[in-house]
Image: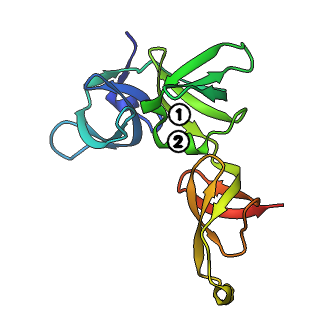
Amino acid sequence: MRVYHSNNFRSGCKIIFENEPCLIESSEFVKPGKGQAFVRVKLRKLLTNQLIEKTFKSTDSLEIADIIEYILSYLYNDGRFWYFINNKTFEELSVEKKIIGGHKKWLLEQDTCVVTLWNNQPISITPNTFVGLEVIDVQATLKGDTINSSITKLATLSTGAVVRVPLFIQVGSFIKVDTRSGEYVSRIK
């Protein structure tokens, strides 16, 4: 069993805390004038995305998490599982619907994404930061509304996602969307 000692905790380290894989987001070593040194850490649980602040003694240690991230291409889904392929080894991987969650609206066939495995089991996926999608339906607007540029309308995209877009976007347009926030970025020509 490999371990990180608390004085080696750094941002980006992946450890096991309370039997769950966690990512260390920040770490601060504190040596007070009196008493024992300690490390103040912010941990992000990878299974639940919960943020925890914890203090460890300078003598504490935690097990290194067996976390591997692969860049895989999305193939298809059957409603229960989403299937991905490693383009280098041609190994196929299936990921359950509950792990895909809300990211399903950003997955296009043949697009790559990062699949995170813990003990060789998928625990999360991260789609590309930006995706280009086709608009298949837009909310109706009034004719005089085009003057005010701050007004937006709802558009349904080819994957089922609904985003706010400027009024000049029409059915058949291709748009760039930021998958982290779900916001319209620009029109693709």
Question: Going 74% across and 17% down the picture, which residue do you hit?
Answer: 88
Q: Quadrant of the C terminus?
A: bottom right
In the image, which disc is placed on residue 103? 2
Q: Position of residue 75 (x, y in %)?
A: 67, 27
Instruction: Give yes or no for contact between labels 1 and 2 (Cβ–Cβ under 8 Å).
Output: yes
Give the color scheme: rainbow, by chain, secondary structure or one colour: rainbow
Q: Secondary structure at mark 1?
A: strand
Which is nearer the eye, 112 or 174?
A: 174
The foreground one among 87 and 6 is 87
Q: Is residue 37 left or right of residue 113?
A: left
Q: Measuring 37% from the left and 9% from the top, which residue is drawn there? A: 1
The residue under the point 67% across, 86% down is 143
* Residue 151 occupies quadrant: bottom right
User: Where in the figure is residue 17, as x and y percent of width and height?
Assistant: 29, 27
Residue placed furthest toward the left: 35
CA–CA distance in space, label 1 to label 2: 8 Å
Can you name the residue that lies furthest to the right here? 189
- In this rendering, the answer to whether 141 lies above or below 9 is below
Query: What amino acid is found at the position of numbered circle 2 in the picture?
Result: His
Pointer 1: residues within 10 angstroms few (<14), some, or many (20+)? many
Figure label count: 2
Based on the displayed image, in which of its 4 quarters is residue 118 positioned? top left
The correct choice, above or below, for 181 with respect to 78 in the image is below
Which of the 4 image quarters holds residue 36? Answer: top left
Residue 6, position in %: x, y? 32, 29
For residue 40, which numbered disc appears in the image? none
Identify the residue under disc 1: 125
